[in-house]
Amino acid sequence: MPPPPPVFRARGLDKSYRLGGTTVRALAGVDLEVDAGEALFVAGPSGSGKSTLLHLLGTLDRPDAGALELDGTDVGPLGERERTLLRRHRLGFVFQDFHLVPVLSALENVEVPLWIAGVPRRDRRRRAEAALAAVGLGDRLAHRPDALSGGERQRVAIARALVHEPRAVLADEPTGNLDSATAAAIVELLLALRRERGTTLVVATHDPALLARAPRLLTLRDGRVVADERAPEAW
Amino acid sequence: MNVFALGWRNLARNRRRTALSLAIVACGTAALVVTAGFVRFSFDGLREAMIHGGLGHLEVAAEEEVERRGVVALDRSPSAALEGWEALRGELERLPHVDAVGANLHLLGLVRRADGAAVSFVGLGVEPDRELRMAFPTKLRSGRGLAATPPAPGDEPVLLAAGLARSLGAAPGDTVTLLMARADGMLNAMDARVTGIYTTGVAELDTRMLKLPLASAARLAETSRVSNLVVALDDTSRTAEVAAAVRRALAARGDALVVTPWSARAPFYEQVRGLYTGIFRFLGTIVALLVVLAASNTLVMTVFERLRELGTLRAIGTTPGQIAALLFAEAGELGLAGGALGALAGWAAVGGINALGLRLPAPPGAVEEIDLELALVPEAFVGAVVLMVAVLLVAAIVPILRATRIAVVDALGHV
């Protein structure tokens, strides 16, 4: 029986942007495989291509060249609607600025991925409550984002990313707006949830304290992979 | 959580801007409601003025005469078909919703004062008691009206319309001579005492019209026949229903008579109605366009400020269709709330304007000012609110296209 395909398999990913009158090559032929349940931290200075790589892995953008498979499916030929549905069911996202809907409570924010997928109200409420409890916010269900601290908001965002049990969670600078203690707690939480649920985790960050705890560290510079290291101890 | 509940919450997010949008929509709605009230007031006023100015709700006339002169002719020859009109009238007055049936005798001739020039006239022999029951008011300018009881031969009263009296230089108390040709071509003359000066309400008609009791008119024309019967109802909306009943009655009698509703005899009413309806639609289009422009601008700003949030929703798997549904719900709710507020404001404005007791100048061709009493038109309230919802949905199209067409990564990076 052949081994299951990696969650992400990228071959020769290339992406350039026009900035003013010049073309900036954000990614230059990136090859990458991320297995199910793996936790990959992507490091590199600003402009190295971390966010671009996450956007491509998350099917939020298309590469200029190269191929990407998600769970063995080539996403290149997929149309916008198919990519949207793929994100809805197989991926979760955590952003640096949390990106919560300000008019919704914590519980309702976590319900959103289930709501758009047409999950019945009672079921989605139960699952959202469980997700918030898992991130330690079982007592903050009715609070709106503006009534939560930065760390709590990011926990809500993590719960939202996990509530529909995706194959992978992509987190772009998830601790960028948090103090160091809260940042450490958030990373602990992400890693713990990954361990419990077996969810694949891809985190882009340039926080050295977090990178020191990376089970697998991919370093980018000028759009190229300059290092791909695995920690000796599995997290 | 559903798109409508989320829509309301998003509208409450920027209360000042939402209030401004609501005010724009409400003003547009109120303007439509008030304008519709004015248009309905005009239609109703003109209709009732024509009906109670002498047309009646229904006319019963000789078929041959109507075919020869057309339904809109103001005067008709005395007809043999209406020879036994009193019996027919009795039968018609027993029909439901009939207030009264009046007989008219139309006359054409010359009128002159003893020491003055002759002026041609269009005369109307009427039954004053029936006119009273039919609420056909005689608008007296001076003197007094015709007595309810038929005058004795040799004591013939006449009312002159104001323009005709001016041409003759006649005043109440004067005696005038009426001359007209009989059916056999002989000329008949009759002295009549001017009891009063009245107005028909229409300046042109005032230069020619006079009124006298039916008995006096019959003596002048030397006929026992009448020109037509005019039927007045207790409710204009019953016209078609009673017309059918009158036709059945006529058919049973076998008379060669036809029934004509007031609307067929008043093409002017339909022309005015068409004109006003056109103006109302034009105004409605202008209001709708203004609301579209104003609301579209507001909705564009709303979407622009929320691009990153909408990008996040797209990122986590919300389809462009779902985003569009959410934004359409917000726009529709804005239209509904603004329309409802505008309907309330319009209702209050109609009441307020009516309470002021304003009078409008006489319309073209008319001689009397009109009491302004705007109507409350239920269908205008519903229609204006529905129109505002539709207008807001249209106004949302451009912002929605913008929100759904922007690349997700661009939306996420939007600040």
Image (tube, coloured by chain):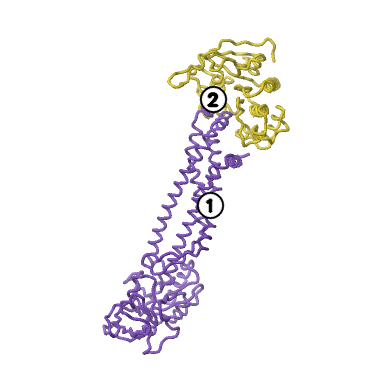
In this rendering, the answer to whether A172 lies above or below B326 is above
SS label for mark 1:
helix
Q: On the picture, is A208 further left or further right than B411? A: right
Residue B145, image x, y percentages: 42, 81
SS label for mark 2:
loop
Query: Chain A shown in which color?
Result: yellow
Residue A20 tag number: none
The amino acid sitting under disc 2 is: Leu
Q: Chain of mark 1?
A: B
Kindly tell me whether residue A168 is visible in this rendering.
no
Query: Chain B shown in which color?
Result: purple
Q: Nearer the viewer, residue B143 or B414?
A: B143
* Mark-to-mark CA distance, 2 and 1: 43 Å
Residue B342 tag number: 1
Circles 2 and 1: CB atoms closer than 8 Å = no
In this rendering, the answer to whether B345 lies above or below B215 is above
Q: Residues within 10 Å of mark 2 (few under 14, many from 20)?
A: many
Q: Nearer the viewer, residue B90 or B197?
A: B197
Q: Quadrant of residue B67?
A: bottom left
- Image quarter of the N terminus of chain A: top right
Residue under label 2, please give it. A60
The amino acid sitting under disc 1 is: Gly
Q: Quadrant of residue B327?
A: top right
Q: Chain of mark 2?
A: A
Q: Residues within 10 Å of mark 1 (few under 14, many from 20)?
A: many
In this rendering, the answer to whether A42 lies above or below B365 is above
Residue A181, image x, y percentages: 69, 21
